Amino acid sequence: MSEENAARKATNWAKTVSHLNVSEVPEGAMNLNVEGRRLASPIQGFGKMWQKTYQVRIPTERVSAADLIETWKQRFPDFWPEGNSFYGPLTGIAPGEVAVVNMVLPGKMKLSTGVMVLYADEESFTLMTPEGHMFAGWITFSATEVDSHTVAQAQVLMRASDPIFELGLTLGGHKQENVFWQRTLTAVSQHFGHEAQVDTRVVCVDSRRQWRRWRNVWQSSAIRSSIYMLGAPGRALRRGSRSRS
Amino acid sequence: MPEQVMAFDVRNASQATRVIDIKGDITAQSEDVLMDAYGRASDEGVKAVVLNFSTLDYMNSGGIGLLVTLLVRAQRQRQGVLAYGLSDHYRQIFELTRLDEAVHIHDTEAEALAAAGVK
């Protein structure tokens, strides 16, 4: 193996962890369903397995592939659609970093989950989900230069984590997810002063559901976030009575 | 940018077991070459596919994604997937991504073939 590859191996991948640890939680972030969780690949998920690819083409005169990835890593939360928050490290995306994610689901339900940066190099970076996230899998963001265009891409490889998320994805969740990443890529393109259509390709890699994984529902971030939100008035009252006494 | 390997060798270890020799880098660009090798390995009656990583140079997250896809295809054919020759680094990556829960990892080809039932 070359020295170059040895160096890439050492720095591009996250170090092995058995359970996730959130180092910093910014004020206002709801930090649930990440601390102490294990990562979950599509193998550990419940639902059908999907590969979803979203691409946008930007002229290379506007941005090179390397510069696009550098910017995307540094300003990742800025490109997310409004109402959703990615609380990552201020230094940007780096292997092993854990970020808290707060999202708004249909019905204005707030969901708290997270991701870990599994891999990052100068051409791509990958975020992997913890147990209880709406899907088990990862998202790889990459950029390549093809025919004087920089092709920015987000590719999701996923299974819904549990039967409830599978139902939610079937009843409009997939569509919502498509819109989410289409808006993200549109924002990336607009950042470099270019308006472009997002090309979307969805492939069902495995149409079978892994019924033996139905118990994943016990770790559901949706259920735990909902319970947490229902308890919010009680917590506020307790805080109030403590400060008065 | 490292040169892409054009084809991975496929060896018959027994009537029901094939070995795929992975060479060079595995990235998202390796999809055709890996799936072509799996297609050649996946004859009728094959019950186990053994992945030889001893000449793997580099693998990125796109490569891990390809292995998951290969695993799904093998499970659909009711084939087991085994691996050997992984460096300590990539063993850790298999653990981190929990691929080791579905791919049976061994130190040597002899151990992998024995586990696949090759005598």
Image (tube, coloured by chain):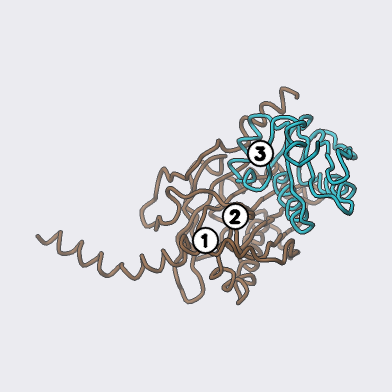
Chain colours: A brown, B cyan
Label 3, label 1: how many angstroms apart (C-alpha)?
Answer: 32 Å
Number of numbered discs on residues: 3
Identify the residue shown where x is 87% and y is 41%. B14
Residue A204 visible to an observer of this rendering = yes
Question: What x and y, as percent, mark residue A5?
Answer: 72, 28
Q: Which mark is residue A44?
A: 2
Residue highlighted by disc 3? A121
Q: Secondary structure at mark 3?
A: loop
**Under tag 2, what secondary structure?**
helix
The chain carrying label 2 is: A
Q: Position of residue A112 (x, y in %)?
A: 45, 60
Specify whether disc 3 shares its chain with disc 2.
yes
- Mark 3 / mark 2, whichever is N-terminal: 2
Look at discs 3 and 2 and give the one toward the viewer.
2
- Mark nearer the N terminus (3 vs 1): 3
Q: What residue is at 64 percent from the left and 40 percent from the top?
A: B94
- How many other residues sit within 10 Å of disc 1, few (<14), some (14-19) or many (≥20)? some
Inspect the image, locate mark 2, and give the three-letter code of the amino acid beneath it: Gln
Category of crowding for the residue at label 3, using alpha-carbon neighbours closer than 10 angstroms: few (below 14), some (14–19), many (at least 20): some
Q: Which mark is residue A216?
A: 1
Q: Residues within 10 Å of mark 2 (few under 14, many from 20)?
A: many
Q: Which residue type does callout 3 highlight?
A: Asp
B108 versus B51 height, above or below: above
